[in-house]
Image (cartoon, grey):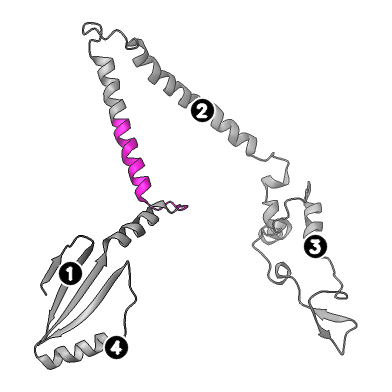
Amino acid sequence: MPLESKIPSRNTEATLKIPFETPRHAEIAFRVLSVDQEPRRNFVSKDLRLVENNIEVHFIADQTQSKHLIWKQLKMPEHTPAPTPHRAIYGYAFYLLVIALFVFYFLWALLPTKEWGLTYLPDKYFAVLLPMLVLVGLSFFAFFIYPAINMSLTAGIDEMASVVDVQLILKGKSKIFVQSWHELQQEMTPKRKSCKNSDNFIGYCNYCLGKHSIPKVEDQIDTLRFLDLAEVNKKLFE
């Protein structure tokens, strides 16, 4: 299948030749391909031609519109961590910047700046002091500040949150504050609700007083929650 391309001033043209064994086979394939017209993608149009036992597919692409489309894609905002051209350019620029700073740091620390007359550069004492300050700061953060943040976010020993996830048990009701297991059990106990004056009205029942209604979604299927500690202790130790 030879592919011949022609590049004029504005449009890009290419011709794809598909050979067949006999002209009859080529005609059948040509009729099949000519039934449904494919939509234009990326401003590329297609033209089919039947030449003896070959099918020639002629492609024409408008470079000006393609460039406009590419520029619009580059300008589109990205909110995903997927790689984009802008991120690739910025990443490569920062990569070169880090390498240049690293090379400059070694040249500043090892070359005889005073003998070469480079008196405007900082003293080489800072070449050792700056890395030491960075290492001391990272060590202080890793061994003191970070553990202090974790300890401040950890619940107390006598708090309910140290045993179970209160928000998970109460189905996301974070405004409810409980201090004991008894209060938590009271909050978890389903309250009897009257079906009268309900918005989700279904109809009246012949055997019950009042009307029936559809329960709320959170009341139909129970969410993920912890097991009752009393039930767990009963199963394990009795």
Amino acid bearing label 3: Thr
Callout 3 environment at 10 Å: few (<14), some (14 to 19), or many (20+)?
few
Expressed as whole percent of the image width and height from the top left, the position of residue 213 reads 80, 78
Q: Residue at x 34, y 49 (%)?
A: 85
Label 4 SS:
helix
Please give the residue where the numbered disc 2 appears in the rendered image.
141
**At numbered mark 3, what does the secondary structure look like: helix, strand or loop?**
loop
- The verdict on residue 82 being magenta is yes
Q: Secondary structure at mark 2?
A: helix
**Residue at image x 35%, y 41%?**
91
At 59% across and 34% down in the image, what residue appears?
149
Residue most extreme to the bottom: 24
> What type is the residue that disc 1 sits on?
Ala
Residue 182, position in %: x, y? 81, 53
Q: Nearer the viewer, residue 32 or 127?
A: 32
Mark 1 sits on what residue? Answer: 14
The residue labelled by disc 3 is 189
Dot 2 amino acid type: Phe
Decide whether residue 118 is among the magenta residues.
no
Q: CA distance from mark 3 to mark 1?
A: 74 Å
Q: Earlier in the sequence, mark 4 or mark 1?
A: 1
Question: Position of 210 compared to 73: left or right?
Answer: right
Instruction: Please identify, in this view, whether the residue under mark 3 or under mark 1 is nearer the observer.
Output: 1
Camera-nearest residue between 226 and 91: 91
Query: Answer yes or no: do the residues labelled 3 and 1 have beta carbons within 8 Å?
Result: no
Q: Residue furthest front?
A: 9
Labels 3 and 4: the sequence-earlier one: 4
- Tell me if label 3 and label 4 are in contact, CB under 8 Å: no
Label 1 SS: strand
Kind of residue at disc 4: Val
Q: Can you tell which mark lies on residue 35?
A: 4
Per the rendered image, the range of residues in magenta is 77-99
